Amino acid sequence: MRNVMIVTALCGFATVALAQNVAVIEQRQQIYKGFGEATKPIGPMLKGDVPFDAAVVKKALSTYVEGTKKLPDLFPDDTKTGHDTEALPAIWQKKDEFVGRFKKLGDDAQAAMTTITDQASFVATMPKVVGDCAACHKEFRAKK
């Protein structure tokens, strides 16, 4: 009977740990989804297909700044796999570099919030910010 209780307790702990891992992965996925949604209108603006909209740009930049504050803590060692994560092992092999990418994106987005005032400054500045995202994807995100 005692062994059954121990096994049951261990299974319970494992279930709680797995649920916590899933929750962390879901949190980071939600932030990235927010990044994607915020970025969708940026491409057409950069191409000149839609008019420059400062409010949309500021919202995207703010989304990046806020997300990059949270993301570094959402990659603990026990979330390397599972729940459809696209995180590559390089994240944990080059953790300092990976976390530094968040800082760079956050800093560049924060600076862009004051730099971007019109179409010309948007076209000159925004590619650097979205380039931060692309650079990280190339090294740290699995291709779909």
Image: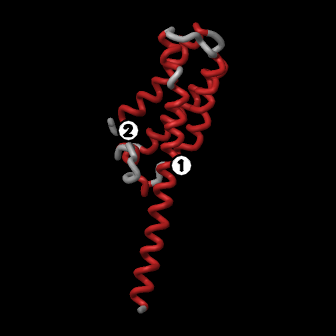
Give the answer, above or below, for where 94 lies relative to 105.
Answer: below
Residue drawn at x 38%, y 53% is 82
Q: Which residue is mark 2?
A: 141
Residue drawn at x 58%, y 7% is 120
Give the answer, above or below, for where 3 lies relative to 60.
Answer: below
Residue drawn at x 57%, y 32% is 64
Query: Residue 22 location, x and y as percent?
Result: 46, 55
The mark closer to the camera, 2 or 1, is 2
Q: Which secondary structure lies at badge 1?
A: helix
* Circle number at residue 2: none
Residue drawn at x 49%, y 66% is 16
Quadrant of the rendering where the C terminus is positioned = top left
Give the answer, above or below, for where 135 lies relative to 115.
Answer: below
**Which amino acid, by three-letter code, is at mark 2?**
Arg
Left or right: 36 with respect to 58?
left
The colour scheme of the drawn protein is secondary structure
Q: Which residue is mark 1?
A: 73
Q: Which secondary structure lies at badge 2?
A: loop
Which of the two residues, 128 or 119, is positioned nearer the viewer here?
A: 119
Q: Which mark is first along the chain, 1 or 2?
A: 1
**Which amino acid, by three-letter code, is at mark 1?**
Asp
